[in-house]
Amino acid sequence: MFKKTAAAAALLIASSAAFAGQPNTFYAGADAGGTPASNAWAGSKTSYGVFPGSNLNETFAVEAGYRRLARHKAYNARGTVDQTAVSLIASMPVGEGFSVFGRAGVSVTDEKVRFTGGRYDNSPTRAVIGVGAGYAFTPKISGRVEFQKTGSDIRNLSAGVSYQF
C-alpha cells in the first residue's frame, strides 16, 4: 500500500508544471496556524485568517489579510489579538510547482483585553515580514506554509490554501 501511495505522490509531483502567478490576476485564500503566547495567558494560540491578493507580474504580488492571532483568558480577563495587514510579496520558483517567497508590509495589530472593572485597547501599527514556501497543486489551487513576524514580539506559523481567479 505504501509503495502505491508513494508512486502516486511521485507522479503527481512529476506531472506538475510550475504554475507561477499570472500577471494582472487575483487570488484569495485562507490559512490556519499558531501564535506563541506568553506564560501569563492561557487560551487559544490557534490563528486563522483570510487573504486576497493581486499578482502584479510573475514575481511580485500585493496582498491584504486579516488574521485572528490569538484569543486569551487569564483570571478575570479575556483578550484577543487581531491583525490587518497589507504586504508586497516577492516569489521565486525553485522546482516543478514549488516556490519560495518573502513578504514585507505594514500591519495594524488590534489588541483588546476586557477585565473586571476595565478594559485595555491598543492598535499599534507595525512592520510585518515573512518567509514561506508554496506548492501549486493545479494552475488555480496552491498551498503554502509561512512564518510571519509582526513588530518585535508577535510570531506566527501558518499553512494555507489559495485559489487564483
Image (cartoon, helix red, strand yellow):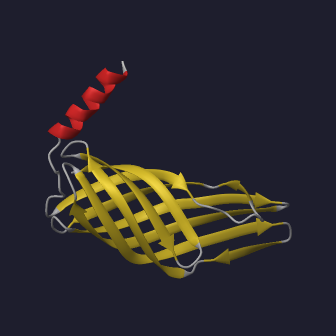
Q: Residue furthest top?
A: 1
The answer to whether residue 14 is above or below residue 133 is above
Residue 104 position by quadrant? bottom left
**Count of marks placed on residues:** 0
Question: In the image, 92: left or right of 5?
Answer: left
Name the residue at 75% across, 62% down: 41
Q: Please name the residue shown 38% across and 66% down the image.
A: 131
Q: Residue at x 63, y 71 (%)?
A: 111
Q: Which percent across, then down, holds residue 148?
A: 46, 67
Nearest the eye: 158 or 71: 158
Residue 110 lies, in percent from the top left, at 58, 71
For the residue pair 29 and 153, the one nearer the viewer reads as: 153
Left or right: where does residue 162 sit relative to residue 66?
Answer: left
- Furthest-front residue in view? 3
Where does the image place residue 4, in percent across and percent down from the top left?
Answer: 30, 21
The residue lying at 33 percent from left, 60 percent from top is: 52
Residue 153 horizontal/vertical position (percent): 59, 75
User: Where does the N terminus fall, quadrant-wise?
Assistant: top left
| 69 left or right of 146 in image | right
The quarter of the displayed image where residue 101 is located: bottom left
Residue sitting nearer the eye, 120 or 146: 146
